Amino acid sequence: MVSLLDIIGPVMVGPSSSHTAGACRLGLLGRGLVSGTPEKAVIELHGSFARTGEGHGTDKAIAGGLLGFRPDDERIRTALEIAEKEGLDYRFEKTALGEEAHPNTVRMTLDHAGVQATLTGSSLGAGRVLVTEIDGFPVEVTGSFHTIVMTAEDIPGSIARITGILANHGINIATLRLTRKQRGGDAFIVIECDESPGEGVRDEIRGLDWVRWARRLDKVSGA
Amino acid sequence: MYKSLAEAIKDAEASGRTLSQTALDMESADQGRTVEDIREVLGRALGVMRGAIDQGMVGDLYSASGLVGGDAAKLRAGPPGPLAGTAFRDVLARALAVQEVNAAMGVIVAAPTAGGAGVLPAVLTGLAASKGFGDEKLVDALAAAGLIGAVIAERASLSGAEGGCQAETGAGAAMAAGSATEMLGGTPAQAGHAVALTLQGMLGLVCDPLGGLVELPCVFRNATGAAIALAGIEMALAGVTFAIPVDEVIDVMGEIGREMDVRYRETAGGGLAATPTGRRLARERLYQIKRGG
């Protein structure tokens, strides 16, 4: 459903909603993935991001997102200098992710506090983004909600346990999707929440011995 | 939100409301937010629009490549033409101002998109200034503009990569024309004709920026788009009607966009981007931008 406020907005630093605002949101999602400003970031740009990114400030916008700047933050203009001051060691590379990849795609490898994470995401236009891969797992995260992504053993009652943890913390689920490649194989779970789950919730979920991997991504869009 | 402008106009007329009120009521029902809350968000957007216009009018901003910038100030203070001193010239200056700020990585409201962000604030604030209207009327107008944009998003497209420039500056002009017509006292039906009369003049417009960057001709397309919107407003308020219903004009804009060759959809493969000079400038100025500038 199209909202009037999606049309009159977002408020953003120019020049391009896809190459600047969307790129910034992907940087913010990367920051969320490692829970802070990374010390090291290898940022690979694909397609139109690689070809016209510099003129659109895509590099500044992604670095700004990694620093925690939102798309309307004018510090994006000088984000590369700020990154150097704040100890974010960044490197931009051009890459080719294949014909299937959306023309505005970025792959980030981020290091923070001893943890490394990778994220691949695309900017779809009008500032909308889609994260398609985290740590090698295929996902679909839009950043319109606070999101938890995880893989878990495919056992009965897993969803009940996880939703129980969320309920105990007063977190309302907006959407929940469970997929698996085969019966008894790993289940891949994406939960979009109305409230931010917090690191405590993430750690409680990670503490379940049948959860292989869990990540939390805070919301990056919406008025 | 509505998927048909004709339906929104019918609802507005049946209940004696304006298109703005109709849009606000529908958004409130859709999103579970109060009308006051929605108006407040629109009010903040208006503040950003005014800020961009003020910033761009100074004339000291240039894009990363240096290819655009400083032209809004020429219209504000440069030599007079036949339209000197008119709201028309002021609107052109405001459209350039917003888009120059956008190209220089300043803060704008993407309404409907960053590339087409100049038309709506230019037309609305320029005409409001000439009539002495305050923010209240402008916030109403932004709601009506949002409704028109939402219908275009639903039935056609708001993306240059999908539908050419008609989908960005064309949509911006349509939104500006309909909302300004109502702001100036036109009926919902007249606002609908203003949208149709404006959009018919933008049909087929390609998206062909040099090097694929939102600079040239985007900055100028916003000014000429605003001029077409002013023509639509003037005709609609004079009682001119357009025989093809507005929803059908929007539909055909979508159809033309889908049929448009990919060279003309933000790929820098055709149009002005592919002229000998366009290619040379892209090579010399756009692909060689130094980091951290």
Image: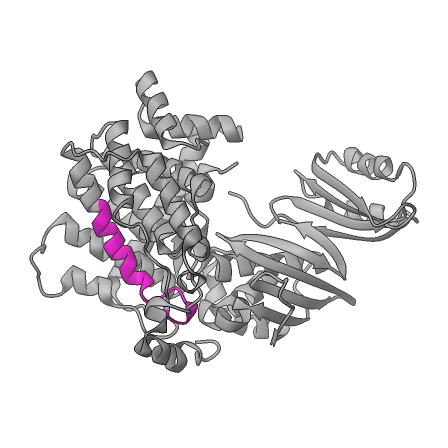
Quarter where residue A43 is shown: bottom right
Q: Quadrant of residue B89?
A: bottom left
In the picture as drawn, the residue positioned furthest to the top comes out as B15
Measuring from the top left, give residue A130's x and y in whole percent: 62, 53
**Nearer the observer, B94 or A169:** B94
Query: Residue B190's image quarter?
Result: top left
Q: Nearer the viewer, residue A140 or A206?
A: A140
Q: Residue at x 31, y 65 (%)?
A: B217
* Count of numbered circles on the image: 0
Type of secondary structure dominating the magenta stretch: helix
Q: Specify whether A210 is left or right of B81.
A: right
Eyeballing the image, is B269 above or below A213? below
In the image, the segment drawn in magenta is B210-229
Across and down, in percent, residue A52 comes to: 48, 70
Q: Is residue A76 left or right of residue B85?
A: right
Relative placement, left or right, of B224 versus A78 is left
Looking at the image, is A199 positioned above or below residue A51? Answer: above
Tell me if residue B215 is in the magenta stretch. yes
Q: Is residue A67 in sight in this rendering? A: no
The vertical placement of B242 against B268, above or below, is above
Is residue A40 in sight in this rendering?
yes
The colour scheme applied to this rendered structure is one colour
Q: Which residue is found at the position 9% from the left and 65% from the top?
A: B79
> Residue at horizontal 41%, vertical 46%?
B254
Q: Position of residue A19 (x, y in %)?
A: 50, 62
Q: Position of residue A41 (x, y in %)?
A: 66, 71
Q: Residue at x 68, y 70 (%)?
A: A39
Magenta span has A180? no
- Using the image as rendered, state which of residue B201 and residue B97 is in the foreground: B201
- Which of the image's four quarters has the C terminus of chain B? bottom left
